[in-house]
């Protein structure tokens, strides 16, 4: 938990956010202590800002106390300088649960239950075979995607064996954004193992998550390159869709796991992780305002007919027989059958999407993390083929797998195929 001083600083940071140079309420904040001006990076501007705080010319922010000693002074300037140079031995982050976690860096022995963190770690050049001593059991079920991890200890997602973890003696355990089932901060404290919660999936915090992992594993420059790669494709797509007037944008329903839930219709709302992808691809999410704490709302046939989507996207989970990197020859047939089921639905038939055959299937792997830019590219090309005639989504996927993940391109990700 944060000490009272830091709580006050947190309140101050929001109260005076408008006074911090270059920051707006919509910017992503890198949640590392030392990011004094609360922007997306730790750089010389943070040293300048701390000096302004010391001189009484700027207001304290939550992250200005870089060394976590309860005061803001020249020692924080020194710590920020070490972080910029990559010479720090200790780093304090604010994790996804709002916990201040101080860690010795670089992390040399880690357990990753969060598969998204593993993707980012491998993309920024972390030697997973050396650093990871335990991984989520799901990774061990996918040897095509994670060949280097097949001899690692299997850690059960949601129900960790604390005695097993204690014997492995990790420097860090990486969980998902929210602890699941039996994952307990208190139990991790009892076995004296540091733990952080981090998202690594949603675009809202993705760049911060990449930078945090870059700092923890001393891969800062590679982390910046990965972010630049993501931004380059995202910006390329958004520059074109931003020029679309509202009346030219397609109305889209994003249907989660139709193969599992049909005939129940589950639409992703504006609170779901897919919203930023739909926004970037120039779509209007017809379920944006539906009330749902989970980001998914059940809708009925009458609603579908009334909302009349121009496009319906069905999202399937990855597996050998369905979609994704490890998909086998039967996946195409599976995706086609799901699409045919939706096209033959009595309500969907009456919509613009049904009449025009604009029902598409996409693998959930393309909805999250750095690879999401490829998912956005596929959606943008499905939505506006003339506008994105030169866009090559498969090329983006090939770059991601071969240049960033170090594995050969393969698999099945969308249906009908574009290229």
Image: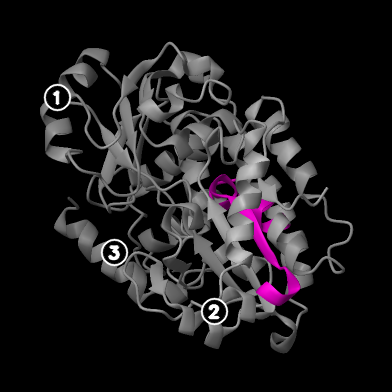
Q: At which x and y percent is residue 212?
A: 46, 41
Q: Is residue 417 left or right of residue 334?
A: right
Compared to residue 279, the image places residue 406 above or below, namely above
The Cα atoms of the two marked residues, 1 and 3, are separated by: 30 Å
Tell me whether circle 2 and circle 3 mark residues in contact (CB < 8 Å).
no
Q: Secondary structure at mark 2?
A: loop
Q: Secondary structure at mark 1?
A: loop
Q: Nearer the viewer, mark 1 or mark 3?
A: 1
Q: Earlier in the sequence, mark 2 or mark 3?
A: 3
Q: Earlier in the sequence, mark 1 or mark 3?
A: 3
Q: Is residue 158 visible?
A: yes
Circle count? 3
Compared to residue 395, the image places residue 8 above or below, namely below
What kind of colouring is applied to the model shown? one colour
Tell me whether circle 2 and circle 1 mark residues in contact (CB < 8 Å).
no
Q: At which x and y percent is residue 223?
A: 59, 38
What are the residue bounds of the magenta stretch? 354-377
Q: Secondary structure at mark 3?
A: helix
Provide the residue designation for mark 1: 191
Q: Nearer the viewer, residue 363 or 57?
A: 363
Q: Is residue 28 left or right of residue 55?
A: right
Residue shown at 84%/63% (left/top)?
Answer: 388
Q: Is residue 373 magenta?
A: yes
Provide the residue designation for mark 3: 10
Residue shown at 43%/22% (left/top)?
Answer: 140
Q: Is residue 228 left or right of residue 52?
A: right
Provide the residue designation for mark 2: 286
Q: Is residue 23 magenta?
A: no
Q: Nearer the viewer, mark 2 or mark 1?
A: 2
Q: At which x and y percent is residue 127?
A: 53, 19
């Amino acid at each position: 938990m944060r000490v009272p001083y830091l709580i006050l600083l947190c309140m101050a940071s929001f109260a005076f956010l408008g006074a911090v140079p270059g920051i707006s309420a919509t910017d992503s904040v890198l949640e590392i202590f030392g990011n004094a001006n609360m922007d997306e990076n730790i750089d010389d501007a943070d040293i300048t800002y701390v000096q302004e705080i010391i001189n009484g010319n700027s207001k304290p922010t939550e992250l200005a106390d870089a060394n976590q000693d309860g005061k803001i002074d020249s020692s924080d300037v020194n710590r920020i300088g070490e972080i910029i140079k990559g010479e720090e031995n200790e780093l304090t982050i604010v994790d996804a649960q709002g916990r201040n976690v101080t860690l010795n860096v670089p992390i040399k022995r880690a357990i990753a239950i969060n598969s998204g963190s593993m993707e980012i770690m491998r993309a920024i050049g972390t030697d997973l075979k050396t650093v990871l001593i335990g991984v989520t059991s799901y990774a061990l079920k996918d040897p095509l995607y994670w060949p280097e991890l097949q001899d690692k200890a299997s850690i059960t997602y949601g129900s960790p064996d604390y005695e097993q973890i204690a014997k492995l003696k990790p420097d860090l355990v990486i969980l998902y954004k929210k602890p699941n089932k039996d994952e307990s901060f208190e139990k991790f404290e009892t076995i004296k193992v540091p733990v952080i919660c981090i998202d690594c999936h949603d675009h809202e915090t993705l760049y911060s998550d990449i930078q945090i992992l870059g700092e923890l594993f001393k891969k800062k420059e590679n982390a910046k390159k990965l972010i630049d790669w993501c931004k380059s494709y995202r910006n390329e797509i958004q520059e074109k869709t931003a020029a679309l007037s509202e009346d030219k944008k397609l109305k889209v329903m994003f249907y989660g796991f139709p193969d599992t839930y049909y005939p129940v219709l589950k639409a992703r709302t504006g609170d779901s992780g897919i919203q930023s992808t739909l926004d970037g691809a120039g779509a209007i999410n017809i379920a944006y305002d539906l009330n749902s704490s989970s980001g998914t709302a059940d809708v009925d046939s009458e609603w579908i007919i009334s909302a009349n989507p121009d496009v319906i996207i069905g999202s399937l989970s990855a597996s050998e027989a369905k979609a994704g990197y490890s998909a086998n020859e039967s996946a195409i047939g599976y995706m086609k059958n799901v699409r045919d089921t939706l096209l033959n639905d009595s309500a969907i038939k009456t919509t613009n999407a049904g009449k025009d055959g604009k029902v598409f299937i996409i693998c959930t792997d393309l909805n999250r993390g750095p690879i999401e830019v490829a998912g956005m590219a596929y959606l943008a090309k499905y939505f506006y083929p003339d506008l994105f005639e030169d866009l090559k989504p498969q090329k983006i996927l090939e770059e991601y797998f071969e240049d960033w993940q170090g594995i050969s391109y393969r698999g099945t990700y969308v249906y009908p195929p574009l290229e």
